[in-house]
Amino acid sequence: MNSIQKSACHKIIHSAAVASAAGNLVPVPGTGFAADMGAMVVMVMSLARVFKLDSSVGAAESKKRAKRKIMSAAASGAAKTLWKKYVAKESAKIISKEVAREIAITALKKQIAAQPIRYFAKECLKPIPGLTALSSAISAGLIEHAGWRIAADFDRRARGLA
């Protein structure tokens, strides 16, 4: 991950953590999960854009790269075979909104599975006056951790290592 991508990821992840924390200030158990999911889906789509893995930017970039490769291979007569292989590889990198939602759900499930006591304590603290802020801080930490894990995964995908 280069410094520009890291800076963009930093802004995206911290914004999602703040949004999640704000949504978790509502003192009703269960609303935190909805706030976390909303923040995660938006965060995943934004992170995908940073690494050019989303459906709009990724498709355009993929077509440009494929066209350059095909033009160079056209002289050798292997253009058709190369086109099939390259397009299949590039289209595997592209992330749609549905895939982003699944990634967000999976990441949140992993966070809950890794730290179930912390997550359920967060939800139980909500109705207690004065401890709602602690619930928000826990949620922000969970979103922050998941965001950096997703960013690292997207970086590996963008470089073709995953």
Image (cartoon, rainbow, N blue to C red):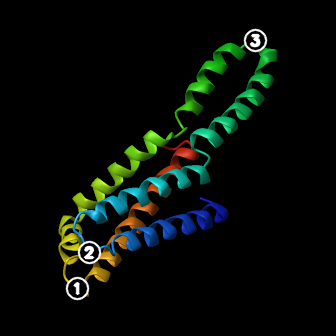
Whole-Å distance between the Cαs marked 1 and 3? 72 Å
State which mark lies toward you, 1 or 3: 1
N-terminal of the pair, mark 2 or mark 1, is 2
Residue type beneath disc 1: Pro
Does residue 64 sit above or below 42 in this rendering? above
N-terminal of the pair, mark 3 or mark 2, is 2
Quadrant of the rendered structure where residue 75 is? Answer: top right
Secondary structure, mark 3, is: loop
Whole-Å distance between the Cαs marked 3 and 2? 66 Å
Name the residue furthest right: 75
Query: What residue did someone put label 3 on?
Result: 77
Query: What residue did someone put label 2 on?
Result: 27
| Residue 116 shows in the view | yes
Quadrant of the rendered structure where residue 3 is? Answer: bottom right
The crowd level at tag 3 (other Cα within 10 Å; few <14, some 14-19, many 20+) is few
Task: Name the side, left or right, on which 123 lies relative to 99.
Answer: left
The crowd level at tag 1 (other Cα within 10 Å; few <14, some 14-19, many 20+) is few
Does residue 129 sit above or below 23 in this rendering? below
Q: Measured from the top left, where is residue 97 in percent x and y?
A: 48, 42
Task: Name the side, left or right, on which 139 lies relative to 47.
Answer: left
Q: Measured from the top left, where is residue 36 in percent x and y?
A: 36, 62
Whole-Å distance between the Cαs marked 2 and 1? 8 Å
Q: Measured from the top left, where is residue 28 in percent x and y?
A: 24, 70
Residue type beneath disc 2: Pro
Task: Indicate the quadrant containing the N terminus: top left, top right, bottom left or bottom right.
Answer: bottom right
Q: Residue at x 22, y 58 (%)?
A: 113
